[in-house]
Image: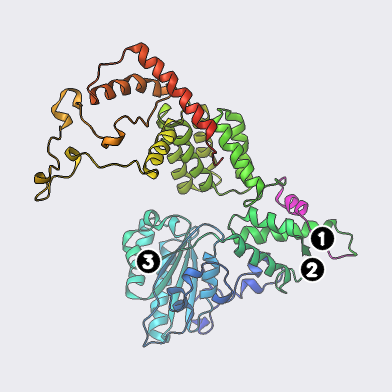
Amino acid sequence: MQDLFSSTHDDDNNYPNTTTAGSAAGAPLAVRMRPRTLDEIVGQQHLLAQGSPLRKLTENTGSNNIGPSSLILYGPPGTGKTTLAHVISQAPDRKFVELSAISSGVKDVRRVMEQALDNRDLYGRTTILFLDEIHRFNKAQQDALLPGVENGWVILVAATTENPSFSVISPLLSRSIMLTLEPLTDNDIGVLIDRAITEERGLNSSVELNDEARDYLIRMAQGDARRALTTLEASAGVAVNQGSGENLPIITVEHAAKAMDQAVLRYDKDGDQHYDVISAFIKSIRGSDVDAALHYLARMIHAGEDPRYIARRLIVHASEDIGMADPTALQSAVAAAQSVQLVGMPEGRIPLSQAVIHLATAPKSNASYVAIDAALADVKSGHAGSVPKPLRDGHYPGAKAMGHGVGYKYPHSYPHAITDQQYLPDNLTDRQYYLPSGNGREHMLVDRLERLRAVLHNEPMPTSEQSATNGQANQEAASKFGDDTTSTN
């Protein structure tokens, strides 16, 4: 347990004092470069507006003002949760106590609460309790926080990388404000790297960083400020060790790759490599080359591509290139996207791989894609037509007098829940948008669809030979559509 940066009355408790870690010589670069005020913080600007809960915690609001609220900081690693706590620790006339849920228990929590009550009653000082990794506390441990939070003995600032809705008890959630921290943008990471290169508490311009290496560090950070600064520091060490000593060392992408013990993979998120690799990835799935698809998946993951972007592309192509030939492909793609969202990376690579294998080995059909685009083409060209009167809404007064809903045949009143009835507008009665390919499970739909359409149009049932011929014609039509259409990938 640590009492950090207390300004006065440090003799009224048994917690050890420490000095600002960011100023300690020899501390890691990520620690030395921690912002000292809210205005130095890069990113998370949606949480730092004037009058925000975070601002209130760093200001001396006075006893007559509305006091600050307890907070739960939720976000991935390296987004500034601990940094915000250290900035809050500088607030005037407040006691700052830090606990880690990894090494603390109920006894430690109760001790803080008792001391906080004494500080309030004896010295008129508010205690801010920073609890890191609160999701590691069980229900009984979190329950111990409730009296102090509810009665205002402490202002709780809790940090977690897991969704508080599942990891924090409801009574504590209802007494706190949850603030969601987002991964830093590439621009944010770039600002932090540039600042660390030039500032005296950082590398103090003792090295230079070329543009290619800067882009590589930003990309590999994946929105994690701590990772970016740690890698920068290691890269600087490699550059200095390999330098001649006569000129100012320049950090190159090779130095950065060596510091990370990873090979450099040429991949730019907004350039040709990004579009070339994702195009090759999708075309490999479409072409049923599972090994090539996995190769391009690995290249994107290794290069730091957003896994959510990869998952979205899988969802689209599960319908575009597989569709009804294997309806479970879409389920696998959606499940992979949800899994990535829930577990994050690097574990998210596993459900992504499973989905890619499923999609690449599944039977292929673009009939669903062709069907909706054909229907849209009719609508855009003005072939809409009026809704047939039996299908119109007949529930409001006067609808029946206009013929709305009159003559509608309720399908469940007929054998097999289907009967002859016109559903398309008069000018489109001969349209057939969906043409099943006959691949995979879709082959079962060829004959069924022919029979459904025969009943709907009150026509003779087709023979098996006719259905087979129609299935072959559908495949040829879909193939021609693919040849004539420019795909996004």
Residue 245 in magenta?
no
Q: What stretch is highlighted in magenta?
A: 247-263
Q: What element carries label 2?
A: loop
Residue that appears at 15% across and 25% down: 414
Q: Earlier in the sequence, mark 3 or mark 2?
A: 3
Residue placed under numbered mark 1 in the picture: 240
Determine crowd level at label 1: few under 14, some 14-19, many 20+ residues with C-alpha closer than 10 A.
some
**Above or below: residue 365 compared with residue 383:** above
Q: Earlier in the sequence, mark 3 or mark 1?
A: 3
Residue placed under numbered mark 3 in the picture: 145
- Alpha-carbon distance for marks 2 and 1? 9 Å
Q: In which quarter of the image is residue 277?
A: top right
Quadrant where the image shows the C terminus? top right
Residue type at the position of mark 1 = Val
Asked if the residue at tag 1 contacts the one at tag 2, i.e. Cβ–Cβ closer than 8 Å, the answer is yes
Q: Quadrant of residue 385?
A: top left
Asked if the residue at tag 1 contacts the one at tag 3, i.e. Cβ–Cβ closer than 8 Å, the answer is no
**Above or below: residue 392 compared with residue 170:** above
Depth-wise, is mark 3 or mark 1 nearer the camera? 1
Q: Which of marks 2 and 1 is nearer the N terminus?
A: 2
> Toward the viewer: 482 or 93?
482
Residue 248 in magenta?
yes
Q: Quadrant of residue 371?
A: top left
Give the image location of residue 435, x and y in percent. 39, 27
Residue type at the position of mark 2 = Ser
- Alpha-carbon distance for marks 3 and 1? 49 Å
Q: What element carries label 1?
A: helix
Residue placed under numbered mark 2 in the picture: 206
Side of 41 where 114 appears, left or right: left
Give the image location of residue 194, x and y in percent. 69, 67
Side of 280 where 100 appears, left or right: left
